Image (cartoon, coloured by chain):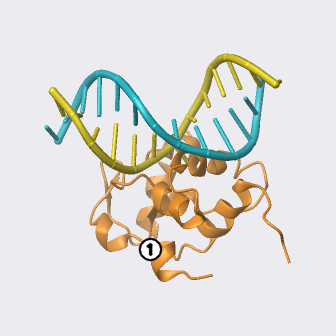
Chain colours: A orange, B yellow, C cyan
DNA sequence: ACTTTGACTATAA
DNA sequence: GTTATAGCCAAAG
């Protein structure tokens, strides 16, 4: 059906598949998409996530160490942290604790 | 078409 | 643990 649309939409789709209580990293998504090193593009796609009008759980996407790098893009407050904690993820000092435990690898648990 | 950017990652010191 | 630097790639200006 859909031929590959923009790189953005691929990211959106993967992020949308992230189950609650889990989180993944930009690099993991990038590698899953085959881009591998374009981890920055994943974040960039997220930046456009609000432009498409779709609900993207971008709060479940953090950097490789579990730090809420993009929390500033969610809102003036710590909305990202709030959302993660609401899903049972322990966040402290804008960083996910036990990130290894909540880490969700699309290439390992999600298979297309 | 060129330049700048950016919610990253890896390696080195 | 940190800071610094390089690589990386696609979209926006």
- Decide if residue A70 is in sight here: yes
Residue A26 placed where, x, y %? 49, 55
Q: Residue at x 47, y 62 (%)?
A: A28
Q: Nearer the viewer, residue B12 or A29?
A: B12
Q: Residue at x 45, y 55 (%)?
A: A62
Picture quarter containing residue A6? Answer: bottom right
Residue A50 placed where, x, y %? 72, 50
Give the chain of mark 1: A
Residue A90 placed where, x, y %? 32, 64
- Is residue C11 left or right of A16 when viewed as pictured? right
- Quadrant placement of the C terminus of chain A: bottom right
Q: Nearer the viewer, residue A11 or B1?
A: B1
Q: Nearer the viewer, residue C6 or A103?
A: C6
Q: Is residue A49 above or below residue A57?
A: above
Residue A97 placed where, x, y %? 28, 61
Instruction: Check disc 1 and report the residue beneath it.
Output: A21
- Decide if residue A75 is in sight here: no
Q: Is residue A55 above or below residue A48?
A: below
**How many marks on residues?**
1
Could you tell me which secondary element the residue under label 1 belongs to? loop
| Dot 1 alpha-carbon crowd within 10 angstroms: few under 14, some 14 to 19, many 20 or more | some
Q: Nearer the viewer, residue A85 or A19?
A: A19
Q: Residue at x 43, y 54 (%)?
A: A81
Picture quarter containing residue B11? Answer: top left
């Amino acid at each position: 059906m859909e031929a590959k649309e923009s790189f953005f939409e691929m990211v959106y789709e993967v992020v949308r598949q992230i189950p609650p209580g889990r989180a993944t990293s930009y690099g993991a998504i990038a590698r899953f998409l085959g881009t591998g090193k374009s981890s920055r593009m994943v974040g960039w796609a997220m930046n456009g996530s609000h432009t498409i009008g779709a609900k993207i759980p971008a709060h479940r996407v953090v950097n490789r160490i579990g730090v809420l790098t993009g929390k500033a893009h969610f809102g003036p407050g710590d909305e990202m942290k709030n959302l993660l904690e609401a899903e049972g993820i322990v966040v402290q000092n804008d960083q996910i604790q036990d990130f290894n435990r909540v880490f969700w690898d699309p290439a390992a648990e999600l298979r297309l």
